[in-house]
Image: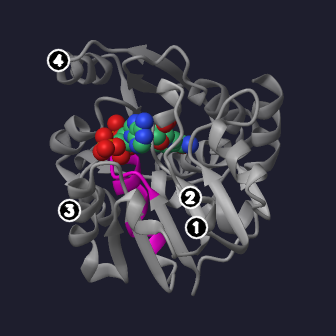
Amino acid sequence: MTDRYGIMGHPVAHSRSPFIHARFAAQTSQDLVYEAIHVEPGAFLAAVDDFRAGGGVGLNVTLPFKQEAFTLSQTVSERARRAEAVNTLSFGAEGVCGDNTDGVGLVRDLVSNLGIEIRSRRILLVGAGGAARGVLGPLLDEGPSDLVVANRTLSRARALSEAFRDQGPVDSAGFSGLDGRAFDLVINATSAEVSGELPPVPESALAEGAVVYDMMYGAGPTGFVRWGQAAGARVSADGLGMLVEQAAESFFIWRGVRPETAPVLEALRRSL
Ligand code: NDP
């Protein structure tokens, strides 16, 4: 029987997840359909009920519903509990299970796809919104020597670093507090580009041989990727690989099969 999956968001028409999951399914001979489902704010719980009533067995959840998905979940993984957000829902005999695959997606793209070391490295995580919160725990699990969360609104960076302090060497800063500090890996988890801006990270924050990673992606290099290139980063990569890797982890949770991500990432890049 064909199993039904989907992604709910607002907006969601732009989502590349149906493209990715269709390729994962074909590659691993899994009998499933995966659709993008537009949901109005305030209508998430009813939309999930409808989806389940129609035979849906698993959902990805994107902005702005990740916190609602967390609240809805009857059991959550440890990484979702720490993130306080769920991007992967499974509906089975045990009820509603929530997980968060964003962080592991980022780490796999950095470590496995791009060959970048996190252990014992100095990391700057720029942004303190939902995306930053989702990746902070999995980044700390990799054992960086220190990790600084920098954000426009310093109080949010502070709250985030305090929430994860028991998990590793994490601290917070405003952008002006970055003067005189250098990092091996600088990750942009802000949505600044949406308003045509860049987070004001000083070029001096890049250590010799530093890597720049932008969680955003698009048809061409993002503004932050271009900033990294111009500032002399050894590697300056966008977040398309993270998107594919977080999807692969969701696929694994649902189907128990790990798809190969490289050909799907390549096809997705070509399609943009
Ligand atoms: P949120 O709205 O929760 O947070 C936005 C963050 O961006 C805040 O830290 C905010 O700072 C900061 N910000 C916004 N505008 C500016 C600006 N002009 N200058 C400096 N900082 C700014 O969004 P999310 O955390 O959910 O998403 C962030 C990004 O991550 C999005 O672009 C999203 O597309 C991307 N993402 C990519 C994924 C992938 O798979 N590649 C997965 C998940 C997210 P402040 O607190 O001061 O408002």
Q: Which mark is residue 202?
A: 2
Q: Is residue 187 magenta?
A: no
Q: Position of residue 152 (x, y in %)?
A: 34, 48
Q: Which residue is mark 3?
A: 159
Distance from disc 2 to disc 4, alpha carbons, whole Å, reads 40 Å
Q: Which residue is mark 1?
A: 205
Q: Earlier in the sequence, mark 1 or mark 3?
A: 3
Q: Amino acid at mark 4?
A: Gly
Foreground disc of the pair 3, 4: 3
Q: Residues within 10 Å of mark 4 (few under 14, many from 20)?
A: few
Q: CB of mark 2 within 8 Å of CB of mark 1?
A: yes
Q: Which mark is residue 42?
A: 4
Q: Which residues are magenta?
A: 126-140
Q: Is residue 127 left or right of residue 166?
A: right
Q: CB of mark 2 within 8 Å of CB of mark 4?
A: no
- Residue 142's place in the image compared with 246, above or below, is below
Q: Earlier in the sequence, mark 4 or mark 1?
A: 4
Q: Residues within 10 Å of mark 3 (few under 14, many from 20)?
A: some
Q: Is residue 254 left or right of residue 26?
A: left
Secondary structure, mark 1, is helix
Foreground disc of the pair 2, 4: 2
Distance from disc 3 to disc 4, alpha carbons, whole Å, reads 27 Å
Q: Is any part of residue 89 visible from this angle?
A: no
Distance from disc 4 to disc 1, alpha carbons, whole Å, reads 41 Å
Q: Residue at x 20, y 35 (%)?
A: 68
Q: Is residue 58 left or right of residue 15?
A: left
Q: Earlier in the sequence, mark 2 or mark 3?
A: 3
